[in-house]
Amino acid sequence: MNFSTMGYFIAVAEERSFTKAADRLGITQQTLSAHIAGVERELGARLLVRKVPLELTYAGEVFLGYARKMQALERSMQQEFLDIAGDERGLLRVGIASTRSHFIMPRSIAAFQKKHPGIEVDLLEAENEELVASLRAGQLDLIVATVTRDIPGLSVHGLYQEEVVLVVARELLSTLYGDKADEVASEVERTHTLAPLASCPFLLLGKRDVPGDLARHIFREAGITPFVRVTSSNTETLLDLCARGAGAFFCPRRLVFSSLTEEQQEAVRIIHLGPRARYWICAAWRASDHVWSATEGFYETLKEEVGAS
C-alpha cells in the first residue's frame, strides 16, 4: 500500500464507478480494479459493494477517511519540500462561494500571480458547507467562506465583514405602494422587519447560501409567507432580475456595487437590515506544522485586495 493506493481508492469512492475513476486517473479499468482488489486482500475486508453505482462498505468508509488523511499528508510533504528547495511552482486549490467569487477572485488572483507566476490556481466555486467539507477532506488548500473559528483541524482568519442588504427596484416599490413607497422602505430599514413588504415579490438564493438562509429567517420572524418569483443559486442573475423590477433580493452589499452599473444602482433602493445581516468572511486552511508559502501568500494578497476595501 502506498500514496498511489490512496489516490486510486479516493477516485473510485468519489466517482462510484471503476470506468469513470480509471478515466480520471489515466489508467485502465482492469488495472484499477485489480489494484483495489489487492488492497482488499491486504486489509482482509471488502471495501466496495460492486454494483452500479458502486457503494462503500463500512470498511470502505473507514478506509476512505484514512486515504484522504494520507493524501493530504503527502501533499503537505510535497509543499514543504518545495519551500525548502525555494521552488515556487505547484497547484494552489482555492474554494469560494459563487456569491462572492465575482468581486473577490479576479483582482486577487491577478495580483497573486504577479508575485507568484509559477503557481497555478485551481478555483472551485461551491456552496459554503461543501467548501468547508472539501477543505477538511484535504481537497482544497484554502477557502474564502463563512467559517466558525472552532472547527477542529482548521486555521481560520477573518478577512472582512460582509453585509446583506435588501435590494428592490424603485419602480417596483412605486407600482406596489404608490406615494408611500419611500415610507414603506424606510419603515423596513428602521424596524428591520419585512412586514411592510408582505405584498412584494421576492427573488431568493438557496437555503445553503448565507443570504438565502438569512432571508428565510427574516421571513419567519415577520410571520409572512413570501411571494417568491424566482429561486436560483446564481447571485448575478437574481441581482439583474432585481434591477429589472422582478422582485426584492437579499444580496451582499459589495456585489451590488461591483455588478450593477451606476444607472442601475440609481434605479434601486438599498435597504439595510441591521447587525444581524452582517457576518465575517474568513480565509481558512488546514492546520499543520507547515503551511505552504503559496497558501500564506494568497492569504496576504486577499488581505491587501479585499480586506482593506
Image: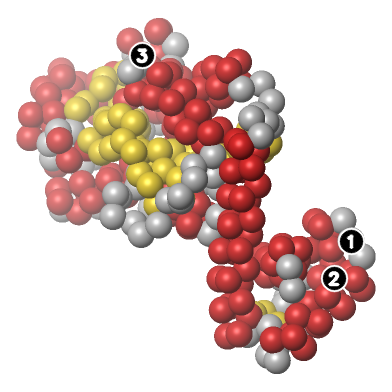
Residue at which label 1 appears: 27
Position of 168 with respect to 108 (left or right) is left
CA gap, disc 2 to disc 1?
7 Å
The answer to whether residue 155 is visible is yes
Q: Position of residue 48 (x, y in %)?
A: 70, 82
* Residue shown at the point (49%, 45%) measured from the top left: 290
Dot placed on the residue nearer the N-terminal end, 2 or 1:
1
Query: In the image shown, does 264 or 143 lie closer to the viewer?
Result: 143
- Decide: marks 1, 3 in contact (CB < 8 A)? no
Mark-to-mark CA distance, 2 and 3: 55 Å
Q: Is residue 16 above or below residue 227?
A: below
- What kind of residue is marked 3? Gln
At x 40%, y 57%, the residue is: 153
Graded by Cα atoms within 10 Å as few (under 14), some (14 to 19) or many (20 or more), the crowding at tag 1 reads few
Residue found at x 53% / y 59%: 137
Residue 279 is marked as none
Q: Amino acid at mark 1?
A: Ile
Circles 2 and 1: CB distance less than 8 Å?
yes
**Residue 235 versus residue 47: which sits nearer the camera?**
47
Mark 3 neighbour class, 10 Å CA radius: few under 14, some 14 to 19, many 20 or more: some
Q: Position of residue 187 (x, y in %)?
A: 9, 29
Q: Which residue is mark 3?
A: 265
Dot 1: element: loop
Depicted 110 relative to depicted 121: above or below? above
- Quarter where residue 68 is shown: bottom right
User: Is residue 88 rendered to the left or right of residue 160?
Assistant: right
Secondary structure at badge 2 equals helix
Q: Give 63 or 12, whichever is nearer the viewer.
A: 63
